[in-house]
């Protein structure tokens, strides 16, 4: 091969004065362009006209079949896309071949960007990126575990109104996801990036809306509209933060390992944020849900008719005092979480640098949003992954939202629920590094199956054996599955985006569509499940503010914690069987994308050469 290359160089030097040789090289490249087998470009510090022509002529005819240990030959990346930009660049190089260039003068100096395809992230950058996602999970943890019981027992709206607040709020948040994704795709790059202004700008308003979500207004008749309005506003603003933050993963580095590492840091910090949110909310408001404020019997009509006036007055005064105390502790918790949100967003802003992919193939004209949406929705791996984790997310959401009610009214664990929640989240935080190692060792799809199936037998165990010891055992085991359900979808979604980029190399800038619609589908499904579960409690006869619920409510809570999540998880895992991106496919995509980026570097350098 070396001899052949030298022979081509000799021929090129002899044919340089004649234009026919150049024309022949161009035709030879045109004939063979449809079956190019990419190899990594060899970058030299000096660009000379004879060598560039020799490379142009010989590259179109050569298939590199010599033994090598590189990944690109191991996976045999063969692309059939029409590389118009590369052809354009090589034509420019051929057209400029007649210009005389000093052989010892470098035409283009070698730059780090031409040799380092994947930007390596520092530990500080990964931590700051991860800290930016923590406050969203702090707030989400508080609302997931406590908003339902807060609306029923503290704000004291009926179960139907509470179900409407939860469902409409979640559905509204889901609708805003693609809308925000659309506006993000239309946003221009600024000095701080394209995504960062969204996150920084919405944070102050997000904190205010979150605080008023936990405030009980003095009027009673309009409380339903109060909570519905502020919950929809909160969902809108959290979408303006979460969609760009999720898409930011693709703009940290082009290296899959760096993105996976940043995602692992992010998931660890988000689970830690969930833990902090549950700890702050649970420990501060725990006194609002203990037995101290409950009389011996519920304040029913029978109790009132059989009690003296003094006992009734004392019971009402005691209940009002504890209700006022409950309102205060919920507002304190909301203020603390709002402060955490501001601090973490500031840390992310100061420590994270948003970067566009400098090596992606250039596009002549931006693709409209609706065409990008159609391309994304036709991408099979994306639809499979979204559908699978939609059902899995609904299952986890059902357990989260009904767990406090289950411990309070169905398992007689109201004095332990905050510690059980903390145990689940501590287990999840500790197991995130375990799952990161597992997915690197055995693959992401295998990790998803092993991690998520783990929760099913333990939730059923808690339903049938509701005692303290079993509850803590279930908490430790469930934390493993919670960690897997949080880590795996966000680790697999960048692989889907890479697969899409490989299938559509000139369709760029659709990352926000992938992430916004993934959040849209999962959030909409979670909203429906929350609304339906609260309606089930209404139909079962949930008594707002009561210290003990009737038997149908207890039975309904057991179904919502046990049978329903298991059914959703089984459905999601069956869909996940169809997910086509295995570890071999993922590594092949990585190699092919690296080759596309290297070809893009070569084509841009040739364009610059032709301009000179």
Image (tube, rainbow, N blue to C red):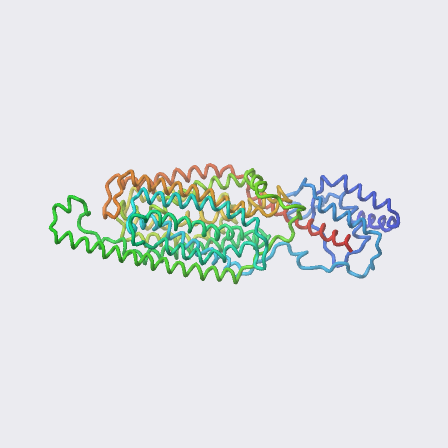
Identify the residue at horizontal 19%, vertical 53% (top origin): 316
Q: In what quadrant of the picture does the C terminus appear?
A: bottom right
Lateral position of residue 230 relative to residue 318, left or right: right
Question: 32 or 233, which lies in front?
Answer: 233
Q: Residue at x 77, y 60 (%)?
A: 106
> Picture quarter containing residue 29?
top right
Picture mark count? 0
Please state the horizontal and vertical placement of residue 494, each as a whole percent of the image. 54, 47
Q: Going by the image, does 72 lie left or right of 300?
A: right
- Residue for point 79% across, 46% down: 57
The answer to whether residue 25 is above or below residue 47 is above
Measured from the top left, where is residue 328 in percent x and y?
A: 30, 58
Return the x and y of residue 397 as percentages of the image width and height.
39, 45
Q: Is residue 238 in view from this perspective?
A: yes
Residue 66 percent coordinates (x, y): 72, 45
Q: Is residue 430 in sight in this rendering?
A: no
Picture quarter containing residue 292? bottom left
Q: Name the residue nearer the viewer: 86 or 439.
A: 86
Residue at image coords 66%, 57%: 113
- Camera-side residue: 9 or 50? 50
């Amino acid at each position: 091969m070396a001899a052949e290359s030298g022979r081509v160089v000799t021929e090129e030097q002899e044919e340089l004065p004649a234009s026919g040789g150049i024309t022949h090289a161009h035709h030879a490249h045109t004939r063979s362009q449809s079956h190019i087998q990419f190899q990594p470009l060899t970058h030299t510090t000096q660009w000379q006209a004879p060598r560039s022509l020799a490379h142009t002529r010989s590259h179109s005819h050569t298939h590199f079949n010599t033994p090598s240990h590189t990944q690109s030959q191991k996976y045999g990346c063969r692309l059939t896309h029409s590389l118009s930009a590369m052809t354009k660049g090589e034509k420019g190089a051929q057209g400029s071949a007649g210009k005389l260039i000093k052989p010892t003068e470098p035409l283009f100096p070698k730059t780090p960007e031409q040799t380092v395809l994947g930007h390596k992230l520092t530990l500080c950058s990964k931590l700051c990126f991860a800290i930016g996602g923590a406050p969203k999970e702090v707030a989400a943890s508080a609302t997931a575990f406590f908003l339902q019981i807060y609306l029923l027992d503290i704000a004291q709206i009926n179960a139907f109104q509470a179900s409407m607040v939860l469902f409409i709020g979640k559905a509204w948040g889901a609708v805003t996801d693609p809308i925000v994704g659309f506006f993000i795709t239309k946003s221009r790059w600024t000095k701080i990036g394209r995504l960062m202004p969204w996150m920084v700008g919405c944070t102050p308003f997000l904190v205010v809306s979150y605080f008023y979500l936990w405030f009980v207004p003095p009027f009673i008749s309009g409380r339903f509209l109060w909570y519905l309005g502020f919950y929809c506003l909160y969902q809108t603003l959290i979408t303006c933060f979460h969609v760009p933050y999720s898409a930011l993963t693709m703009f940290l580095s082009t290296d899959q390992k760096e993105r996976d590492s940043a995602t692992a840091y992010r998931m660890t910090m988000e689970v830690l944020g969930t833990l902090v949110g549950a700890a702050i909310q649970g420990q501060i408001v725990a006194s609002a849900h203990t037995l101290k404020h409950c009389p011996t019997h519920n304040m029913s009509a029978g109790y009132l008719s059989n009690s003296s006036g003094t006992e009734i007055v004392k019971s009402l005064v005691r209940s009002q005092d504890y209700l006022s105390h409950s309102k205060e502790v919920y507002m304190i918790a909301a203020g603390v979480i709002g402060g955490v949100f501001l601090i973490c967003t500031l840390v992310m802003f100061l420590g994270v640098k948003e970067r566009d992919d400098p090596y992606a193939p250039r596009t002549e004209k931006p693709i409209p949003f609706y065409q990008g949406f159609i391309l994304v929705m036709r991408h099979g791996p994306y639809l499979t992954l979204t559908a699978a984790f939609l059902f899995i997310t609904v299952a986890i959401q059902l357990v989260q939202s009904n767990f406090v009610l289950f411990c309070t009214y169905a398992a007689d664990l109201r004095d332990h629920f905050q510690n059980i929640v903390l145990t689940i989240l501590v287990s999840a935080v500790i197991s995130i590094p375990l799952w990161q190692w597992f997915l690197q060792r055995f693959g992401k799809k295998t990790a998803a199956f092993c991690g998520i199936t783990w929760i099913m037998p333990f939730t059923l165990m808690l339903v049938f054996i509701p005692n303290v010891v079993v509850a803590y055992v279930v908490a430790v085991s469930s934390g493993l599955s919670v960690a897997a359900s949080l880590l795996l979808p966000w680790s697999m979604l960048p692989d889907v985006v890479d697969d899409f980029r490989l299938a559509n190399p000139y369709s760029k800038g659709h990352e926000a569509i992938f992430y916004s619609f993934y959040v849209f589908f999962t959030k909409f499904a979670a909203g429906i499940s929350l609304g339906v579960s609260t309606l089930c409690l209404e139909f079962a006869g949930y008594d707002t503010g009561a210290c003990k619920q009737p038997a149908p409510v207890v039975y309904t809570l057991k179904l919502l914690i046990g049978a329903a999540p298991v059914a959703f998880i089984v459905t999601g895992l069956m869909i996940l069987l169809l997910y086509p991106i295995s570890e071999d496919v993922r590594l092949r995509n990585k190699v092919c994308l690296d080759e596309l980026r290297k070809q893009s570097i070569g084509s841009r350098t040739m364009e610059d050469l032709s301009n000179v």
